[in-house]
Image (cartoon, rainbow, N blue to C red):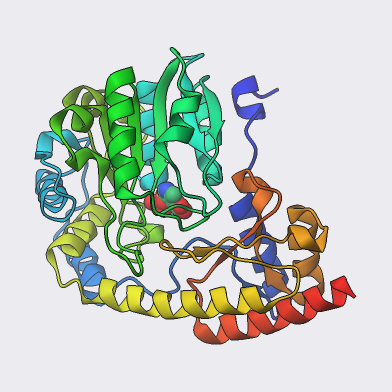
Amino acid sequence: MISERVGNIAPSATLAVDAKAKQLKKEGKNVLNFGAGEPDFNTPENIKEAAKKAIDKNITRYTPIGGIPELREAIAKKFREVNKIKYDASEVVVCAGGKHVLYNIAMAILNEDDEAILPVPYWVSFEEIIKLTGAKAVFCNTDSHFKLTAKDVEEKITPKTKMLILNSPSNPSGAIVDKNEIEKIAKLAVEHNFYVVADEVYEYFVYGKKDRVSIASLNDKIKNLTVTANSFSKTYAMTGWRVGYCGANKEIIKGTENLQSHSTSNISNIAQMAALEALNGPQDSVKEMIMAFDERRKFMHKRLNEMNGVSCVEPEGAFYAFPDISETKMSSMEFASKLLEEALVAVVPGSAFGSDKHIRLSYASSMEDIEQGMDRMERWVKGRLL
Ligand SMILES: Cc1ncc(COP(=O)(O)O)c(C=O)c1O
C-alpha cells in the first residue's frame, strides 16, 4: 500500500510518450520522435574531457552538499554577467538537474494549503511538484499567444498565494513574457509578498527579439523574493549529467541544502567538474545549437500551419511548437496516440500541459526527421479529416 502523496502523482506524460516511441523503435518500427525535451546534439568534447580528467585525478569523493566552491563561484559569475543578477556564491546551490532544483525549492517554500500560481499551459512537472508539497496549484490564463500578463496573475492572488511559477521561454509553448509585464509582475510579488520561481532553463533559446529579462535583475526587493532556477541540461546538451542550479536568498539556499543533505547529498563530483568546464570553456557549441534550432523552428512552424485543421502560434523560444489541433475534433490524447500508432510520429498530448486543444512537438531533432515527420503528419491529418 503506497502513500496517498505518491499515489496521487500523475506519471510524466512526456517520458511516457518517449518510452512508447522507444519501444516501437526497438521493435524495428521507423518512429520519428518529437516527444522528448532534449537536444539531439552531443555534449561538447571539452566538457566530456573535463569529466574524464576528473576521474583520472580521483575527483570522485563527496563534496559540499550544495556544490564545490569553484562551481558555485562560476555560477554566481554567470548570473552576474549573463542575467545581471548580483548573487554571490553563498546564494547558489547545485542540485541533480533543473527538476530537482524545482522540487527542492517547492519543498523549501511551500506549506500545506499554500497556493502556487501556475500559468497555463505549463510544463508537466510543475503541477505534480506543487501537489507533492501539499500546496494547491492555482491555474492562471495566458493570452492567445500563451504570454503571461500581470493582469492575469493579479486575478489569481489571494492571501494564501505563496509562489508564482514564471517559465520564460516556456515549455511547452515557447512564449516569452514581455519585459513590461515582468516589471508589473515583480511589483505584484513585492506588494503581495509572494515568491517567484523563475525557471530559466531555456534562457539561451530565444529567437528574434532578444529582450528577455531575468525578473531577479530588476531590483533588490524582487531579487530577495525570487528563486532563479536553471540547468546545464538544455544549454550544454547535458541532459543525462544531471546538473541544475539556482540562485536565491540565503535562507532558501540553506533550507534547500538541509533538505538535500538528507536525500541526494552532493551531486556527482565528476558531473560538477564537467559543469565547471561548460561555464568556463568555449561557448561556440551553444551558438551552433541555437542557430540549428532556429532554422528547424521556422521550418516546423511553417509546415504545421500548412496542414488542414492545425494552426500554430510562432514559438519565440525554447525548442517546442505547440499547435492547436482542436479543428480535427480529436482530444489531444486521441490525436497523439493515433498519430503514433498509424503514422509512427511521436508527439505529446497537450492535456499533459493543461490544454487538451494542443499537442507539443520538440524541434530538437534532425532536419531530415522533421521534414519526414511533417510529411507523415500532413498526410495523416488529411486522411483523418476526409
Ligand atoms: C521548463 C523546464 N524546467 C526544468 C526542466 C528540467 O530539466 P533537467 O531536470 O533535465 O535539468 C525542464 C526539462 O524538460 C523543463 O522543460
Residue 335 lies left or right of residue 289; in this view the side is right
Residue at 48%, 21% (x, y): give it: 115
| Residue 279, picture quadrant | bottom left
Residue at 57%, 80% (x, y): give it: 370
| Residue 283, picture quadrant | bottom left
- How far across and how far down the image is residue 351, in percent? 68, 47
- Front position in the image: 118 or 211: 211
Residue 310 lies left or right of residue 65; in this view the side is right
Image quarter in which the N terminus is found: top right
Residue at 54%, 27% (x, y): give it: 138
Q: Is residue 139 above or below residue 169?
A: above
Q: Is residue 368 above or below residue 253?
A: below
- How far across and how far down the image is residue 382, in percent? 81, 77
Q: Is residue 196 visible?
A: yes
Q: How many marks?
A: 0
Q: Residue furthest right?
A: 386
- How far across and how far down the image is residue 208, in percent? 34, 69
- How far across and how far down the image is residue 14, in percent? 60, 54
Residue at 69%, 81% (x, y): give it: 30
Q: Is residue 362 above or below residue 352?
A: below
| Residue 7, picture quadrant | top right
Image quarter in which the C terminus is found: bottom right
Q: Is residue 193 visible?
A: no
Q: Is residue 215 above or below residue 321?
A: above
